[in-house]
């Protein structure tokens, strides 16, 4: 006879792992969330996204089709993880953890229900909870009032603590290390993938040296040449580099869920006159944008000023996306702080503690003189004493014609 198995259980296997931040830091974040909960009469919050669970607990989950959570009440914070992860989620959670098993369908929701209790109002992430999971929430928690807490958590994440900024600054340095390795690997006939791997390997080795207790996963490099440079998020291919290629260098070290980036236009051999003209114009826009990133600046106003510059050069038609975004717990497959982007429809005012990029990009289609994607990218910390550019890798034709 098969023994009955538990729906949930706790497994404190080993000792707690050193997290990217102190328990005091996570308690400070939770205190701000709990203040928001009290102000809005929310008795429990169900966090389900990778970025928010990592932000408030330190645990960055690997879903593989399974749901995860962090349930926050006024006196408890508990991550909910799948049995397949063993004791790792407890070790990497600042506070409590409960495991749900796969032996019976919906044990995840039974775990959530036990933690939420008989709450009247529950906060959820409206931009993450799927329709099917919303139905499960109603089935297991009953006719409760649901409040979208996602906008409030995003606003909290947009202003970084001193410890977060310290990590981000070191990560930006590591992005530069990856950039140097990429530039050194560039040569005629080399494949994009081989150049990208050189940058990724250099960053992971440096992360292991500088952050020996961090999770070593998810760092990556996008490196493209020629036509492949036309998009900011184009995948790496096996295309071989050719003399005369425009190149895009993009390095992304990931440290315990925290993202930084370095992006540069390079050239293999001498660019033609029109390409050089466009490249230099994008560099001017980049420098203009950097000069605008300061306390009190409005995101949409920064965007307008750069738009006017490009329009004066008849290049605005080649702009491809907003001019910058926030940094923190995010990645190319999770997380984003849309309230801090340099776009026409974002009116956030910059203030100390915010971290934002300046990254103008022009994409000129094939068949037009100067074809290719041009992009420069620096990270700026808005500090009390003024903005600080934490990216050190040089940019522009003076430095990046290889």
Image (cartoon, rainbow, N blue to C red):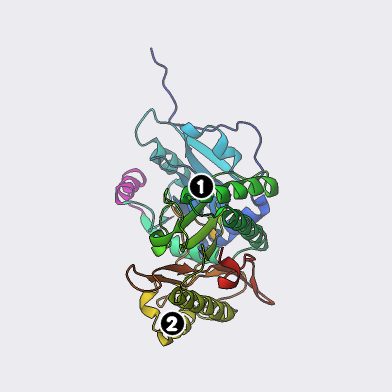
> Which tag is nearer the camera, tag 2 or tag 1?
1
Tell me if residue 30 comes above or below residue 158 in the rendering: above
Label 1 SS:
helix
Residue 139 covered by magenta stretch: yes
Tag shown at residue 310: 2
Residues under labels 2 and 1: Cα distance?
Answer: 35 Å
Q: Which residue is mark 1?
A: 194
Residues 47 and 287: in front is 287
Extent of the magenta region: 131-144
Tell me where residue 358 appears, x and y as whole percent.
53, 72
Label 2 residue SS: helix
The image shows residue 375 at horizontal and vertical percentages of 48, 68
* Residue sitting nearer the eye, 296 or 185: 185
- Count of residue discs: 2
Left or right of 63 on screen, residue 379: right
The numbered mark at residue 307 is none
Outermost residue, top direction? 1
Q: Quadrant of residue 353?
A: bottom right
Q: Residue furthest bottom?
A: 312
Query: Where is residue 242, by image quadrant?
Result: bottom left
Q: Residue at x 49, y 63 (%)?
A: 154
């Amino acid at each position: 006879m098969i023994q009955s198995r538990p729906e949930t259980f706790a497994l404190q296997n080993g000792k707690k792992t050193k997290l990217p931040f102190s328990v005091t830091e996570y308690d400070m974040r939770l205190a701000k969330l709990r203040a928001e909960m009290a102000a809005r009469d929310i008795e429990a919050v169900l966090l389900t996204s990778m970025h928010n669970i990592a932000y408030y607990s330190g645990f960055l989950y690997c879903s593989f089709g399974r749901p995860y959570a962090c349930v926050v009440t006024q006196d408890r914070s508990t991550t909910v993880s799948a049995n397949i992860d063993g004791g790792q989620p407890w070790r990497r959670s600042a506070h409590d953890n409960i495991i749900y098993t796969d032996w019976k369908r919906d044990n995840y929701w039974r775990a959530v229900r036990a933690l939420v209790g008989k709450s009247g109002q529950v906060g959820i992430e409206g931009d993450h909870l799927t329709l099917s999971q919303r139905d499960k929430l109603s089935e297991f928690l009953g006719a409760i009032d649901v409040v979208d807490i996602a906008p409030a958590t995003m606003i909290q994440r947009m202003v970084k603590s001193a410890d977060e900024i310290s990590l981000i600054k070191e990560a930006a340095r590591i992005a530069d290390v990856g950039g140097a390795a990429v530039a050194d690997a560039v040569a005629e006939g080399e494949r994009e993938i081989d150049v990208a791997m050189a940058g990724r390997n250099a960053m992971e080795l440096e992360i292991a040296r500088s952050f020996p207790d961090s999770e070593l996963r998810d760092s990556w490099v996008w490196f493209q040449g020629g036509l492949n440079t036309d998009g900011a998020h184009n995948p790496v291919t096996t295309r071989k580099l050719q003399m005369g290629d425009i190149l895009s260098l993009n390095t992304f070290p990931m440290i315990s869920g925290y993202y930084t980036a370095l992006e540069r236009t390079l050239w293999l051999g001498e660019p033609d006159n029109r390409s050089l003209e466009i490249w230099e114009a994008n560099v001017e826009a980049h420098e203009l944008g950097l000069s605008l990133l300061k306390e009190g600046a409005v995101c949409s106003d920064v965007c307008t000023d750069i738009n006017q510059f490009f329009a004066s050069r008849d290049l605005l038609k080649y702009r491809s996306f907003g001019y910058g975004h926030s940094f923190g717990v995010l990645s190319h497959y999770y997380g984003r702080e849309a309230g801090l982007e340099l776009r026409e429809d974002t009116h956030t005012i910059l203030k100390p503690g915010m971290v934002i990029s300046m990254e103008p990009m022009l994409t000129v289609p094939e068949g037009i003189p100067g074809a290719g994607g041009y992009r420069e990218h620096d990270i700026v910390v808005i500090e009390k004493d003024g903005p600080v550019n934490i990216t050190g890798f040089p940019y522009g034709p003076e430095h990046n014609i290889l």
